Amino acid sequence: MEITLRSLHVTLVALLVSTLIGVPLGAWLALGRVPLRRLALALIYTGMGLPPVVVGLFVYILFSRSGPFGSLAWLFSLRAMIVAQTILALPMVAGITMSSIQSVDPALRPQLRALGATRWQVVRTIAVEARFGILLGVMAGFGAIISEVGAVMLVGGNIEGRTRVLTTAIVLETRRGHFALALALGAILLSLSFLTNSLIMLGQGGGRWRR
Amino acid sequence: MSEPIYALDDVAQVYGTRTVLSVPRLDVRAGEVLAVLGPSGAGKSTLLRLLGLLEAPTRGQVRFHSGERWVTHAEARTEERRQIAMVFQRPALLTRSVRANVAYGLRVRGERDAAERIEAVLRRVALDGLAKARAHTLSGGEAQRVALARALVLAPRVLLLDEPTANLDPANVRLIEELIREQNAQFGTTIVLVTHSIFQARRLASRCALLIEGKLVEVSPAAQFFEAPRDPRTRAFLSGEFVF
């Protein structure tokens, strides 16, 4: 139970941070005049396929005692895990937000302007038009974070009672030969993912703009 | 006719290396229905976007009189821009209900208690039965009427119409033309109507302009434009002999 809550804690905080940064970033890339746009896109697309272990290694180095953020002493804590997960989910949220906003009819923008909307109001309206795509991006981010094991193992250390989460616990129990326990944890992980996604779908269906 | 509401001075619009519009001088007068005629690709829509203050000209000045002062694209404040509403040839609607689409312009103005005005305009465009329908399930004519309704509900001083009846059936054309006439007669709304239809211009316009390859060939009162055009190209265009 405690492991499950910890998994959720890390996932939700990392998802919140990547959504708060990723959705505006994706909207900016889709609608704004972005300097070095191609480079930014290449980085985001690369980021969507980042090997988690490499991100883990990178965060490990950053927060290790001799690293630039070593003095924070975040390594082997939930904070380091959240940082790694955010780095993994952010490109996904930003990339999918961007492409879903780009798929909104480009003719809409000048027409909304011509109805008296300010630039900011146009951006907000376009984002609302792309809401299902943006939601999909957030869901993809959620899926990536909650199922991730390599990075959290590295930077969290899988310390019992402190940084052990569902995925790292499954790895451990499998290695120990406790297959029943590992399977049970796997079932919890799966149902967590299923439940969350179902809740989001329900929320989407019951929203103001029911299809 | 009354005082000018638009003044164009030595205006040119260049996209890439192509000069799509070049207008040394043009006034639009308050309360008139100005029809801008011309073949496709003549720069009619470009002219309309400039009048809508949606873009700035490459050269020269498009100035709009807000009732208090003359403003250009760069100078216009939001409330001044909001005196102008525009209907595009291909309406892009929000994936919401018809009513939500019509309410959009009011909502961005912070007017939330406008239910009665919205119902009234929906009745005017004969869409009151479809208020709750999803906008993307509408036919072409219905969608164009939503586009017109969402502009009319704003009670704009200027209404810019870009081929508002292109590709529509006669019943829809009649309905939309009737609304345009009514809007001008009852509310004194200044209307600039871009059309390739001589017949539509004849039915609606008080003044006509002919645009060919980005240049104004002739601007004159409707009666003169149709009965005694000065320019041979106008005569050719009106008689359908114009060949490109």
Image (tube, coloured by chain):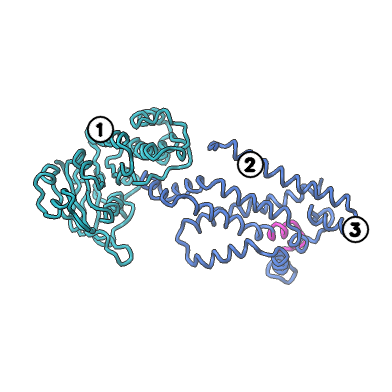
Chain colours: A blue, B cyan
Mark 3 vs 2, N-terminal side = 3
Q: Is residue A38 placed above or below A179 in the rendered structure?
A: below
- Residue A93: horizontal and vertical position, in percent? 60, 55
- Residue A28: horizontal and vertical position, in percent? 50, 57
Q: Which of A72 and A132 is in front in this view?
A: A132
The residue marked by circle 2 belongs to what chain?
Answer: A
User: How many callouts does the rendering have?
Assistant: 3
Quarter assignment of residue A175: bottom right
In the rendered image, residues at marks 3 and 2 fall on the same chain: yes
Label 3 vs label 1: CA separation? 83 Å
Quarter assignment of residue A195: top right
Tag 2, which secondary structure?
Answer: helix
Q: Is residue B66 placed above or below A69 in the rendered structure?
A: above
Give the residues drawn in magenta, as a range: A71-84
| Residue appearing at x 14%, y 41% in the figure | B1
Label drawn at residue B182: 1
Residue with the mark numbered 2: A201
